[in-house]
Amino acid sequence: MTPPFLYKYKPAINFADKNRHPDFLESGLLRMTPPSEFNDPFEGLFNISDSNEYAEEFVCDYLKENKASQAFDIRIQKIEMGIKKGTSNRHERRKSIKVIKSPKIKKSFIKKINSNLKSFTPVVAESIDNASSSFATTRDKFGVLCLTENCFDTTMWAHYAEEGKGYLVEFDNSKHIINDEFYREGILYEPQKVFYLKSKSISLSKNNIESSQNPLLSKHDNWIYENEWRIIGETEKINLHKNSLGIGLVEIKQDSVKSITLGYNINNADLKQYREVIKSGPFKNVNLRQATVNKEKLELEYIEI
């Protein structure tokens, strides 16, 4: 089930740097990041060490269930037509057709086909290796906007919001998060859930973007605590938009931002500057909160300011 709200942890604004690029709170732009720039070095890559094993599994499971059964049905249809043409005796005709359609005959037929299917395994394995190598060199043609279901996670605050010195953006997931213009220029689809796996085996289905074996939607289960959702786009097309600045920036719809929560470790001087930036930026009408540490409950609380 798609969560009603998704979140984006953002690092602190370096107010001392007068030459810095405008922050999201000032520009309303977020970057679709290439997979090679993520903190997971295996992002967007396949585990191909077991390509032969996967190929054999693919051949035995997928082809066996689909192709062999289809081949049997086609063969039976031809035999049945031959029986009907070969005899006018209705009783003999029914008896013969019943025999060829028996489960025992079908099982024997499929077993014979499956014994020959294994010869296709090396061909499939080679296809897996080629596809994996090809994707490894082209993965940065895609840009990824990473979101999460977690809004009170201190680990996320630490890793992605500079230990509470940054801020948290809350998105209303019932609306398009990215400006509609970009859907004509490269956004492939709205937030999709990331699958967490023990390994990342390649999928031979290029069109199944929701598959748990899509390399851009699957991660090792070491990262399961992130509860991640992703919006994925084609960087080349996104960069055609004037606001992308050639680095994959996309414009966020103002009405999709429900709240902004400032970090629990922001000092008073920076807090004042944050409030000034937000007041004069695209999200001036959004609910503004600050995270605080409840020392009695040992948990975070978000208080409107």
Image (cartoon, rainbow, N blue to C red):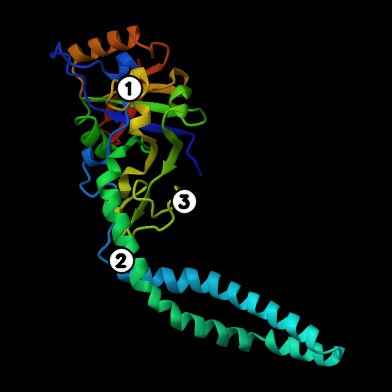
Residue 142 or 290: which is nearer the viewer? 142
User: What residue do we see at 43% from left, 71% from top?
Assistant: 59
Which residue bears the numbered disc 2? 51
How far across and down, in percent of the image, does residue 128 sit?
33, 61
Q: Is tag 2's residue or tag 3's residue first in the polypeptide sequence?
A: 2
Q: Is tag 3's residue or tag 1's residue first in the polypeptide sequence?
A: 3
Amino acid type indicated by mark 2: Ser
User: What residue do we see at 26% from left, 49% from top?
Assistant: 136
**Label number found at residue 289:** none
128 to 273, vertically: above or below? below
How far across and down, in percent of the image, does residue 188 sit?
44, 37
- Which quadrant would residue 248 be assigned to in this image? top left
User: What residue do we see at 31% from left, 46% from top?
Assistant: 225
**Is 256 positioned to the left or the right of 95 in the image?**
left
Residue 243 or 10: which is nearer the viewer? 243
Q: Residues within 10 Å of mark 1 (few under 14, many from 20)?
A: many
User: What residue do we see at 27% from left, 26% from top?
Assistant: 247
Amino acid type indicated by mark 3: Asn
**Is 175 positioned to the left or the right of 6 in the image?**
right
Q: CA distance from mark 1 to mark 2?
A: 38 Å
Which residue bears the numbered disc 1? 244
Q: Residues within 10 Å of mark 3 (few under 14, many from 20)?
A: few
**Label number found at residue 208:** 3
Q: CA distance from mark 3 to mark 1?
A: 28 Å
Q: Is tag 1's residue or tag 2's residue first in the polypeptide sequence?
A: 2
Secondary structure of the residue carrying tag 2 is helix
Residue 143 or 115: which is nearer the viewer? 115
Residue 147 or 161: which is nearer the viewer? 147
